[in-house]
């Protein structure tokens, strides 16, 4: 459905952030993209959704193909119309708009205006808490409610592919569970394909059908979640476990550095 | 007492006109953080184009009015395409400087066609006096007030209810997030500038109608947009309206109750401007920054 072939992204004409990044997202699946801070996960999503331009970033090499068509030179609005919707890192709800107006903003590219009302109710069925707060100013919602609103806003666009950038950021563990359950439900009930960027590798590997791990602007490992979970490096660096399950000693850290170099 | 009512009505009409001009200014500021120094000059464009079309071309006033509004919309689109879009990525201050250039350009165009001499404007609004609560007011002033009130209601419904209005507010809130909704920010900017030009052009026509076609008087009214928006808050639409009414009333009362040789009425709005900047720099209704992230 979506494939990135060896893409290169440069910010401000000089900062090379993605260095030959490739991945595949098959229709109907949940694909996880994991990696540490600064690996280039958000940049990857913005390259797909056409949101690099306001940050002076550019895809300078390689290609992004969605449903058989190249999209890496298209405007963000065109990409949303084709069915890709990014839920940006940090939720980014429209703080001065109320909950319902945020949802309406999400439906901006829809041509079937008459169904919007009904879809707002559908979003409220997923997130009853939003229904209770529909006239409340979004800026004053709690972090969890804002994340629900950000996901609800994505649903309003009826996308084929939703890209979620760290939906668990700053949320309490129980709420993270709830959000992840809903992400799975959306995938199953709506048939929406999901590309999930996460720091929380354990949870992401639990819900994903396939996962990629990126370091330093490119993919270093990929596979089925079960395979990755049993990979020694993944266990150590992303799941925080080592073979005996004890805390790492200094020697292990040095070892970590060495292996990490090898990884990237 | 009659004088008081008289002044109140005059002040309200002036205030309504200020509000109309300020509304457009606030819209541009909200959508793009740009302070539009050309806002007042759109009044001149509106008044002079309408004058030219009615008097010099000989079109009926209704057609001329419509054409002037079309020019306003086109002006917004042209500004977005040829002024703002090439400036994407430049610091806001550069864009603001460009609006100063635009202001000079518009003034130069108007003076090169029509000069700065005062002219008799073809008044198409009825001017017969109407009596209200013992005071007499020309009908055109009342009509002007009514027109402005209707426009303000239309705009507020537009921003609350319509898809484009909500998209405009969303863009004002977070441009990149708006982009991620598939909202075309360029279209929103063009729309903000077009609406701003339309409101100012209408204000210019109304002013020319209830006074005369004077380059300097209309420029002076354009200049009042600054005290109005500083008072109301640069980014507040209700603030633009209330600020406009306050400045309009204040100026008219000062003109009515102080000796005219002091010319206090023309400086009072700017005295207010300075005081507000000192005590409440975000204005009366400036949008509070929402601090939870
Ligand atoms: N607008 C920008 N201009 C210049 N450099 C940028 C820009 N955005 C990101 N970068 C750089 O690109 C690299 C990757 O950033 P990115 O945000 O994609 O990482 P990430 O994997 O999403 O990290 P995190 O998990 O912390 O969100 C970082 O080194 C960052 O400093
Ligand atoms: Mg990120």
Image (spheres, grey):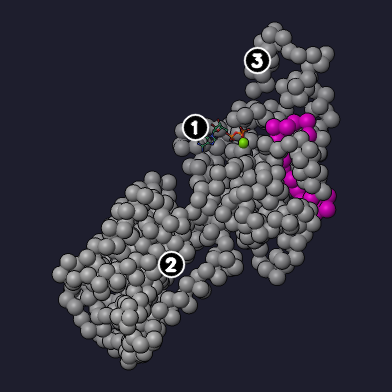
User: Mark 3, mark 2: which one is toward the viewer?
Assistant: 2
Residue furthest left in the image: B261
Cβ at disc 2 under 8 Å from ligand 1: no
Q: Are marks 1 and 3 in contact (CB under 8 Å)?
A: no
Give the alpha-carbon distance from disc 3 to disc 2, as whole Å. Answer: 63 Å
- Residue beneath the point at 72% across and 28% down: A221
User: Mark 2, mark 1: which one is toward the viewer?
Assistant: 2
What numbered label is drawn on residue A257?
3
- Residue beneath the point at 79% across and 57% down: A125
Viewport quadrant of the N terminus of chain B: bottom left
Is residue A102 or residue A41 the one in the foreground? A102
Is residue B177 or residue B231 the one in the foreground? B231
Q: Position of residue B16 (x, y in %)?
A: 39, 73
Q: Position of residue A187 (x, y in %)?
A: 80, 48
What numbered label is drawn on residue A15?
1
Q: Quadrant of residue A24?
A: top right
Up the image or down, B133 lies above or below A64; here it is below
- Dot 2 alpha-carbon crowd within 10 angstroms: few under 14, some 14 to 19, many 20 or more: many
The reply to whether the magenta stretch includes residue A190 is: yes
Secondary structure found at label 1: strand
Secondary structure found at label 2: helix
Left or right of residue B128: residue B241? right
Residue furthest top in the image: A251
Left or right of residue B115: residue B160? right
Q: Earlier in the sequence, mark 1 or mark 3?
A: 1
């Amino acid at each position: 459905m979506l494939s990135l072939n060896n893409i290169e992204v440069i910010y401000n004409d000089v900062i090379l952030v993605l260095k030959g990044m490739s991945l595949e997202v098959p229709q109907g699946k949940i694909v996880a993209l994991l990696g540490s801070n600064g690996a280039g996960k958000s940049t990857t999503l913005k390259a797909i959704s056409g949101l690099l331009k306001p940050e002076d970033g550019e895809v300078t090499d390689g290609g992004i193909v969605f449903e058989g068509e190249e999209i890496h030179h298209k405007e963000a609005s065109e990409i949303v119309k084709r069915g890709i919707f990014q839920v940006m890192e940090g939720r980014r709800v429209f703080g001065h708009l109320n909950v319902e107006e945020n949802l309406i903003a999400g439906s901006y590219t829809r041509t079937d205006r008459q169904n919007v009302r009904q879809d707002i109710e559908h979003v409220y069925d997923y997130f009853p808490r939003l229904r209770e707060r529909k006239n409340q100013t979004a800026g004053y919602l709690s972090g969890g409610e804002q994340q629900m609103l950000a996901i609800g806003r994505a649903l309003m666009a009826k996308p084929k592919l939703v890209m979620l950038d760290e939906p668990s950021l700053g949320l309490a563990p129980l709420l993270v569970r709830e959000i992840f359950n809903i992400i799975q439900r959306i995938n199953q009930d709506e048939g929406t394909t999901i590309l999930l960027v996460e720091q929380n590798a354990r949870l992401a590997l639990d819900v994903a059908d396939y996962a990629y791990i990126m370091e330093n602007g490119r993919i270093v490992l990929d596979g089925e979640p079960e395979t990755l979970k049993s990979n020694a490096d993944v266990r150590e660096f992303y799941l925080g476990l080592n073979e005996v399950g004890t805390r790492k000693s200094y020697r292990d850290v040095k070892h970590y550095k060495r292996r990490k170099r090898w990884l990237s | 007492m009659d004088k008081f009512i008289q002044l109140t009505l005059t002040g309200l009409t002036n205030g309504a006109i200020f509000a109309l001009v300020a509304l457009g200014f606030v819209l541009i500021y909200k959508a793009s953080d740009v302070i539009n120094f050309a806002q007042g000059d759109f009044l001149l464009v509106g008044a002079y184009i309408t004058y030219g079309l009615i008097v010099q071309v000989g079109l009926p006033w209704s057609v001329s009015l419509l054409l002037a509004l079309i020019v306003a919309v086109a002006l917004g689109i042209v500004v977005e395409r040829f002024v703002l879009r090439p400036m994407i990525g430049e610091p806001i201050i550069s864009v603001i400087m460009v609006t100063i250039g635009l202001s000079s350009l518009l003034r130069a165009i108007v003076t090169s066609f029509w000069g700065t001499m005062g002219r008799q404007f073809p008044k198409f609004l009825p001017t017969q006096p109407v009596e209200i609560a013992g005071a007499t007011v020309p009908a055109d002033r009342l009509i002007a007030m009514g027109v402005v009130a209707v426009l303000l209601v239309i705009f507020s419904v537009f921003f609350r209810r319509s898809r484009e209005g909500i998209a405009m507010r969303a863009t004002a809130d977070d441009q990149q997030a708006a982009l991620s909704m598939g909202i075309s920010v360029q279209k929103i900017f063009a729309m903000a500038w077009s609406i701003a030009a339309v409101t100012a052009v209408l204000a210019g026509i109304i002013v020319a109608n209830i006074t005369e076609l004077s380059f300097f008087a209309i420029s002076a009214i354009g200049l009042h947009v600054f005290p109005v928006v500083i008072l109301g808050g640069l980014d507040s639409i209700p603030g633009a309206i209330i600020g406009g009414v306050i400045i309009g009333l204040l100026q008219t009362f000062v003109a009515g109750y102080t000796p005219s040789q002091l010319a206090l009425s023309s400086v009072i709005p700017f005295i207010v401007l300075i005081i507000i900047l000192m005590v409440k720099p975000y204005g009366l209704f400036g949008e509070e920054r929402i601090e939870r992230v």
